[in-house]
């Protein structure tokens, strides 16, 4: 012991001289993630969408579920600072939207009635809702004076504010993609680890199965699966089963990725060391393989979410996805299938903006994570 | 430290006491005996993964280690040293042969074919030190969890108790227990190897298979780790199978040396005996390649001709005969057996009795 204690201090003095702060894995990842500008922007985009979705009632000046047939297909209303006479107003306002029918075609023509201004107000009390489903409140972020309307993205066929509907649709679109991804990751990572760790026949069988799933034409399969959902089911069950459908077709990518990673790790000394000390397979998988494959799982996860958002939007657009009273971004655009409707009311495509922001946001974050997830790459 | 810092000198001072002890009761003190161990790896080819051949990584290795002894296993890269060590610890399933291990209670068990479950209690007594201190530590675990993992797996200690034991182990290998919550990447190579050593010692093993424990380290750090290993071996009464490709490292720590060439042991004897009086031509060539401490000494290196034999298609007869400068007809026909030519000096060479080979200072 004497010899060891004498020779030891020289070896560790470099570290022991001062108690420097040591960083955990996730601190290191965060440090590198922060340096990527697109990733931060992507993250903010997602957070913004999530806040809009969670507090959608707070952000919508009118009840997005209330039918209002007279104002069907109102175009987006402009927020003015300068009135018709060219006078500048510090407080933004809207004009009343009035409808006229074109004499020959009976096409509705919307115009602004500049005789009456409705000032925009912040933190107003109007229609009642339940914040987070618990607290009953009437507060809203913005609104206009009594009698006026503010429809930032116009209205749909039933006169409902598209802005409020799109915010609300984010709840389903985001939560379904998260839930579907969660199932996909659970299935994919377990099968990937098993396939990579045990190898041999198990691996061969699983890989052929993955190839089989991948060779299935996705669209007809989705349509079939979506079509066999009984229409009598309540919306929550439909939500669950739709998530599972999306998950079932997206887990293969993750399973392959994780398998490759695990196969690389399987040959490393620390797995051998774990075997040498008598660790069980379960312990090796969950204590040694999983944590090391986690960075890759997270990256694939962030890239799976936008895929499911797109797939869901696609199915709902075709009318075989989500059904009323649930709404998703794709569902909102269902009316845009009709070219004539789309031609005369192009604003009903506006939920596309939300989809684009969500997909871009998750992709940015995924790219940033991919670079940040391996903080030891320099070592 | 005494002779500790001298790495290169060929004949360093030895622990005379230990040597005397094992000489007295030489035969009944064997802790590990390996008999005709074979480890073949199949070569798969084609879509159907048909087995087209075998890599005979270990092809009939026999040796034994006495309690409290350090046996150095030397040979060039790819000769099967590491595979031998791993097969003994049942990280592979040996193709053939026997591995006899004597347990703490004196019971002798044959472990080459037992299940992993039956092997588990034995893993407390026989452990391994890995070569690469970078890849052998899980980067996602703290030092505490790495060193304490064997304790948890074998149900020896948990929580606070485990932490205390880890602190004790860290002190024993010359690390400050204050750093047990750090991750491996925060340590240098030498420190990482100390962490690996602490992990190996955590279950108080009796036999340690050290697989090139210093070859991945800087030379300056090598000496520190070697000395620590030697010191712990003496103090804890460990038995060591010290695997290395560097004869100058092996002779520094070993009581006896076994020389390996393409999956076979060609010579085994006491360190001094092997170095001064080698009986196998391959050992002679190996010794001649060790650089002497004095740069003025002219080197009489024997340069072996040809390539190392392929473990897939080993030559007939003596595996060394294509490169042996003393080879005769018989060498290419009949395979020599490892035999005790002189007391405690084993060699597998047809010409062992005839040749007079060059050792150190001879």
Image (cartoon, helix red, strand yellow):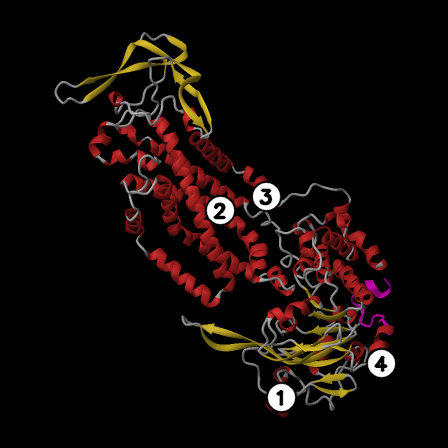
Is residue B201 toward the left or the right of residue A200 in the image? Answer: right
Up the image or down, B360 lies above or below A248; here it is below
Distance of label 3 from label 1 (alpha carbons): 59 Å
Image coordinates of residue B310 in percent, x first then y, are 57, 77
Q: Quadrant of the N terminus of chain A?
A: bottom right
Earlier sequence position, callout 1 versus callout 4 = 4
Q: Are marks 4 and 3 on the same chain?
A: no
Q: Secondary structure at mark 1?
A: loop
Eye-nearest disc, 2 or 1? 2
Eye-nearest disc, 1 or 4? 4
- Which residues lie in the magenta part? B1-16
- Judge whether residue B351 can be spotted in this image: yes
Image coordinates of residue A133 in percent, x first then y, are 44, 30
- Label 4, on which residue? B24
Assign the magenta stretch its main secondary structure: loop
**CB of mark 2 within 8 Å of CB of mark 1?**
no
- Label 2, on which residue? A299
- Label 3, on which residue? A26
Displayed quadrant of residue B62:
bottom right
Distance of label 2 from label 1 (alpha carbons): 57 Å
């Amino acid at each position: 012991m004497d010899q060891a204690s004498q020779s030891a201090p020289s070896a560790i003095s470099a570290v022991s001289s001062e108690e420097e702060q040591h960083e955990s894995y996730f601190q290191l990842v965060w440090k590198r993630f922060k340096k990527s500008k697109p990733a931060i922007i992507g993250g903010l985009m997602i957070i913004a969408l999530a806040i809009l979705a969670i507090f959608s009632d707070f952000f919508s000046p009118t009840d997005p579920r209330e039918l209002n047939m007279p104002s069907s297909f109102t175009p987006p209303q402009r927020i003015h600072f300068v009135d018709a006479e060219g006078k500048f107003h510090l407080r933004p306002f809207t004009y009343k939207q009035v409808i006229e029918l074109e004499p020959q075609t009976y096409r509705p023509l919307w115009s602004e009635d500049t005789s009456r201004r409705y000032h925009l107000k912040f933190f107003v009390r109007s229609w009642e809702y339940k914040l987070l489903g618990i607290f009953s409140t009437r507060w809203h972020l913005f609104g206009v004076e009594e009698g006026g309307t503010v429809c930032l993205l116009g209205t749909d066929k039933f006169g409902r504010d598209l802005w409020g509907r799109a915010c609300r649709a984010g709840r389903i679109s985001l939560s379904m993609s998260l839930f579907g991804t969660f199932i996909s990751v659970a299935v994919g990572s377990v099968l990937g680890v098993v396939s990579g760790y045990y190898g041999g026949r198990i691996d061969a069988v699983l890989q052929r199965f993955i190839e089989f799933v991948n060779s299935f034409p996705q669209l007809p399969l989705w349509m079939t699966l979506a079509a066999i959902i009984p229409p009598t089911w309540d919306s929550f069950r439909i939500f669950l089963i739709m998530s599972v459908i999306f998950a079932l077709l997206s887990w293969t990518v993750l399973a392959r990725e994780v398998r490759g990673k695990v196969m690389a790790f399987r040959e490393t000394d620390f797995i051998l060391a774990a075997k040498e000390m008598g660790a069980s397979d379960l312990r090796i998988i969950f204590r040694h393989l999983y944590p090391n494959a986690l960075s890759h799982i997270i990256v694939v996860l962030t890239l799976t979410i936008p895929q499911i958002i797109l797939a869901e939007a696609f199915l709902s657009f075709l009318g075989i996805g989500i059904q009323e009273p649930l709404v998703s971004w794709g569902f909102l655009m269902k009316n845009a299938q009709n070219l004539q409707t789309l031609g005369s009311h192009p604003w009903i495509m506006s939920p596309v903006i939300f989809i684009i922001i969500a997909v871009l946001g998750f992709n940015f974050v995924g790219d940033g994570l991919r670079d940040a997830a391996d903080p030891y790459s320099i070592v | 430290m005494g002779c500790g810092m001298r790495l290169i000198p060929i004949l360093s001072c030895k622990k005379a006491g230990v040597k005397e002890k094992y000489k007295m009761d030489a035969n009944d003190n064997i802790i590990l005996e390996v008999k005709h161990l074979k480890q073949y790896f199949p070569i798969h080819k084609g879509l159907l993964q048909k087995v087209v051949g075998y890599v005979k990584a270990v092809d009939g290795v026999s040796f034994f280690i006495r309690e409290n002894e350090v046996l150095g296993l030397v040979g060039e890269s790819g000769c099967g040293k590491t595979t031998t060590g791993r097969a003994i610890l049942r990280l592979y399933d040996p193709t053939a042969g026997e591995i006899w291990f004597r347990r703490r209670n004196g019971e002798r068990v044959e472990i080459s074919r037992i299940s992993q479950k039956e092997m588990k209690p034995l893993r407390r007594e026989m452990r391994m030190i890995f070569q690469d201190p970078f890849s052998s530590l899980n980067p996602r675990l703290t030092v505490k969890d790495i060193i304490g993992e064997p304790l948890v797996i074998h149900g020896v200690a948990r929580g606070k108790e485990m932490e205390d034991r880890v602190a004790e182990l860290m002190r024993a290998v010359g690390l400050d227990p204050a750093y047990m919550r750090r991750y491996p990447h925060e340590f240098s190579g030498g420190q990482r190897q100390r962490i690996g050593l602490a992990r190996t010692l955590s279950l108080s093993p009796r036999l340690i298979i050290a697989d090139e424990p210093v070859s991945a380290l800087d030379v300056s750090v090598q000496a520190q780790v070697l000395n620590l290993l030697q010191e712990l071996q003496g103090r804890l009464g460990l038995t060591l199978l010290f695997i290395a490709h560097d004869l100058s490292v092996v002779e520094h720590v070993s009581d006896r040396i076994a020389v390996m060439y393409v999956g076979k042991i060609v010579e085994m004897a006491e360190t001094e005996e092997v170095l001064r009086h080698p009986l196998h031509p391959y050992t002679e060539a190996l010794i001649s390649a060790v650089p002497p401490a004095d740069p003025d000494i002219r080197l009489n290196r024997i340069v072996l001709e040809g390539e190392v034999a392929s473990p897939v298609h080993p030559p007939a007869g003596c595996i060394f005969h294509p490169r042996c400068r003393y080879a005769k007809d018989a060498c290419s026909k009949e395979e020599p057996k490892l035999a005790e030519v002189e007391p405690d000096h084993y060699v597998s060479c047809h010409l062992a009795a005839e040749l007079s080979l060059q050792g150190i200072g001879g």
